[in-house]
Amino acid sequence: MMVRWMLAALGSALTLCPVMLEAAPGTKDNSTIGGQDSATYDALMHLAASPHRTPMQRAHDHDRHPIETLTFFGIKKNMTVLDASPDSNGWYTELLAPLLRDQGQYVAALWDAKSDSPYERAALQTFKAKLAARPDLYSKVSVVALQSPHSLHPVKPRTVDLVVSIQALHLWLLHDTAPAMLGALYTALKPGGLLGLVDNRADPLSPTDAHAKLGYVNEAYAIDLIKSVGFEFLEASDVNSNPKDARDYDQGVWALPPTYRMGDKDRSKYTEIGESDRFTLKFRKPSAR
């Protein structure tokens, strides 16, 4: 599979021996983990099956491939990781916060508590309530504000090892905040730090919509935009690709699960398609900056 080849190639480039591990149930085959320490991978495998995640939450693994995605990003247990605009339900938080709890630091960068939007303030409270419900898992999480234009310094500059951005770029494009938000992430990263990004992939043959009004982003446009703030593009993975996604729905990506904006109309069709076709990209902040 292409993602396995890419991860193995990365391991060879770093002169590390690939670690052979059993793939987690419901995930894509990822038996060769190039450049990834086995302790981090084993911890992710354990957390993915942990009872703190409900069966409904674990069911999303089939579409989202969190272990393979985080492995591709190069995550390690001792990193400081900034999660840029995580969803209020904290789906990735359930893996990242416990993973980094003892040796690293998980920073959740969400909306500003002083936001003018009642929706954003309520979503922030939902996220904080989730953390408060399980202090054994989440008491060390740092919650900071990351929102354009007034909250663009979520952490001290040059202190983050890895930024994770999961399906946030299309929303930043929609609200004309992408350059500012990406610039904030660049500033937060240490020289040589990594940015791992996932978002909904637009049809490359369709005209580029710079505002992603239907929730889909042209992959080449995204790469150029991220490079424009100073990042170096490293590589892409097909781990979150979905060839069933036709990307031609009246309600855009939100017609698909888990949103189902069309309600019961054609619900079985959208369920069969699954979640969106997504690109998965890795960038680096140059070591000299």
Image (spheres, grey):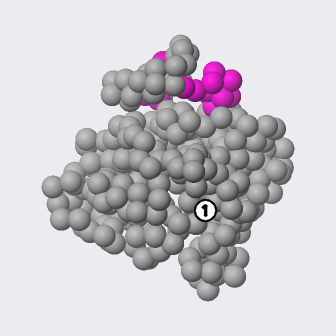
Question: In which quadrant of the rendered image does the C terminus lie?
Answer: bottom right
Say if the magenta span includes residue 35: yes
**Residue placed at 57% from the left, 80% from the top?**
149
Viewer-proximal residue among 23 and 58? 23
User: Relative to 167, is 44 on the left or the right?
Assistant: right
49 up-or-down from 82: above or below: above
Q: Position of residue 137 (x, y in %)?
A: 78, 44
Residues drawn in magenta: 27-46
Q: What amino acid type should be assigned to the residue bearing mark 1?
A: Thr
Q: Which residue occupies 78% across, 49% down?
A: 138
Q: Is residue 5 above or below residue 140?
A: above
Q: Residue furthest left?
A: 205
Give percent across and percent down for residue 280: 41, 45
Q: Is residue 30 visible?
A: no
In the rendered image, which quarter contains the N terminus?
top left
Residue depicted at 39% across the width and 28% down the height: 6
Is 225 in front, or is 216?
Answer: 225
- Dot 1 alpha-carbon crowd within 10 angstroms: few under 14, some 14 to 19, many 20 or more: many
Q: Position of residue 13 (x, y in %)?
A: 46, 25
Task: Check residue 289 for magenta coloring.
Answer: no
Residue bearing mark 1: 187
Residue 286 appears anywhere in the view? yes
Given residues 138 and 175, the one toward you in this image is: 175
Q: Where is 262 relative to 91, above or below?
A: below
